[in-house]
């Protein structure tokens, strides 16, 4: 039978209190030079679930993502972050929730956010084996694909009663890594703290976007403008258009500026937008063929028909002006195709106060025509 450490008992009592409701907290960010002691988060469970198979994950906790895997797929495992408000101190704990199954922990994976590269100087580990004693652990450095790096490995004994500091500063293969894997032949509980890093480097973004906008032209064309603060090996911009936000077609291209640290401005005019909502994005391609995307923006092109609607977009709880050439029903449908408003109107101009509706995209059907409306 597994005999949990004092830390485990203290934290398991807290877990029973927190388990009365679902509780998830993430502290995002990138890893930083120096020692991360996990003291900027609230105490409490961060992730729980089946530890077998692909494991469970706690993401974006003070610059790191954690993944726990076990030799058994059935137990409910916990990754829990403790901070200074708990008497036992700071750190990240890995254990089985009920202490009734106590499967072996097959792996603890710690990777840096945003694909950051770093030198691992040291890490503190407190661990317990299936017999309730110290656990022998192996620390392995990982590359950007999560694969072990040859030579980036160190083994030692992690104390069951105290945090053991593993000094890796003399092992050169632990420099320039992207993550860490901790394994053991017999480990049922682990506690990680004091991860010391230096030379943290974030990957260079191919393009640093400043702005991307779309405006209607008098000729019903759409003018797109975008700017970048920096570019790295940037070859080409492809302007992509969609009428549903899912299916995309390239409607034009612009050459990039290679590598630049100055602000660059670009523009492109789409001459044949569709009536209704038009979506746009920019596909940026590097010299080596790799690519990335800008954010997606949208703009409404008014249909030249017998129905006029304004203002568009319209603010919630603000009258909408509807002008009809012929009398008939004006029907408003939401993005799910559900009828949310209907009114019979005579020919002419009408000020219509819509019912309270959520912000979003709607379609007004009147005089046999469809007009896209955005409610803000």
Image (cartoon, grey):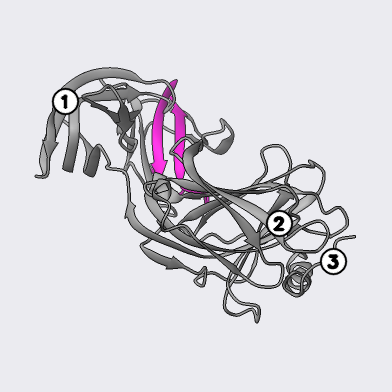
Is disc 2 in contact with disc 1, using a CB cutoff of under 8 Å? Answer: no
Residue 356 percent coordinates (x, y): 52, 52
- Give the structural element (helix, strand or loop) at label 1: strand
Residue placed at 27% from the left, 21% from the top? 289
Q: Which residue is mark 1?
A: 269
- Give the structural element (helix, strand or loop) at label 2: strand
Residue 52 percent coordinates (x, y): 74, 41
Q: Of the residues tagged 3 and 2, which is closer to the observer? A: 3
Residue 3 is marked as 3
Farthest-out residue, right: 1
Residue 216 picture quarter:
top left
Q: Residues within 10 Å of mark 3 (few under 14, many from 20)?
A: some
Whichever of labels 3 and 2 marks the residue nearer the N terminus, that label is 3
Residue placed at 78% from the left, 41% from the top? 73
Q: CA distance from mark 1 to mark 3?
A: 70 Å
Q: Please, what is the dominant secondary structure of the magenta stretch?
A: strand
Q: Residues within 10 Å of mark 1 (few under 14, many from 20)?
A: some
Q: Which residue is mark 2?
A: 78
Whether residue 359 appears in magenta in the rendering, the answer is yes
In the picture, the quarter occupied by the N terminus is bottom right
**Numbered range of the magenta stretch:** 351-376
Whichever of labels 1 and 3 marks the residue nearer the N terminus, that label is 3
Q: Of the residues tagged 1 and 3, which is closer to the observer? A: 3
Residue 118 percent coordinates (x, y): 38, 52
Whichever of labels 2 and 1 marks the residue nearer the N terminus, that label is 2
Q: Which residue occupies the foreground of this view, 147 or 14?
A: 147
Q: Of the residues tagged 2 and 1, which is closer to the observer? A: 2
| Residue 275 is at least partly visible in this image | no
């Amino acid at each position: 039978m597994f005999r949990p450490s004092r830390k485990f008992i203290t934290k398991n009592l807290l877990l029973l209190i927190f388990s009365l409701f679902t509780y998830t907290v993430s502290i995002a960010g990138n890893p930083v030079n120096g020692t991360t002691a996990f003291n900027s988060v609230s105490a409490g469970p961060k992730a729980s679930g089946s530890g077998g198979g692909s494991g469970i994950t706690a993401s974006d906790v003070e610059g790191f993502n954690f993944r726990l895997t076990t030799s058994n797929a059935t137990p409910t495992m916990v990754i829990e972050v403790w901070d200074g408000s708990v008497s036992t101190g700071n750190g990240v704990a890995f254990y089985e929730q009920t202490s009734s199954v106590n499967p072996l922990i097959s792996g603890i994976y710690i990777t840096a956010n945003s694909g950051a590269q770093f030198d691992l100087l040291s890490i503190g580990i407190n661990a317990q084996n299936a017999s309730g004693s110290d656990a022998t652990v192996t620390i392995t450095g990982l590359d950007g694909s999560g694969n072990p790096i040859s030579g980036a490995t160190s083994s030692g004994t992690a104390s069951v009663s105290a945090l053991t500091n593993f000094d890796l500063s003399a092992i050169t293969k632990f420099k320039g890594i992207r993550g860490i894997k901790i394994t053991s032949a017999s480990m049922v509980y682990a506690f990680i703290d004091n991860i010391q890093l230096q030379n943290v480097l974030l990957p260079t973004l191919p393009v640093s976007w400043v702005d991307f906008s779309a405006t209607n032209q008098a000729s019903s064309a759409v003018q797109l403008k975008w700017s970048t603060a920096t570019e790295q090996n940037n070859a080409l911009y492809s302007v992509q258009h969609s009428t549903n936000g899912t299916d995309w077609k390239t409607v034009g291209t612009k050459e990039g500026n290679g590598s630049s640290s100055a602000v660059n401005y670009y523009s492109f005019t789409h001459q044949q937008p569709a009536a209704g909502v038009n979506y746009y994005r920019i596909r940026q391609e590097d010299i080596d063929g790799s690519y990335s995307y800008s954010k997606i923006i949208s703009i409404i092109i008014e249909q030249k028909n017998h129905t006029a609607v304004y203002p568009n977009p319209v603010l919630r709880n603000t009258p909408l002006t509807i002008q009809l050439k012929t009398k008939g029903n004006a029907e408003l449908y939401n993005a799910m195709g559900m009828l949310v408003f209907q009114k019979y109107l005579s020919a002419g101009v009408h000020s219509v106060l819509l019912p309270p509706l959520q912000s979003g995209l709607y379609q007004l059907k009147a005089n046999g025509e469809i007009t896209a409306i955005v409610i803000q």
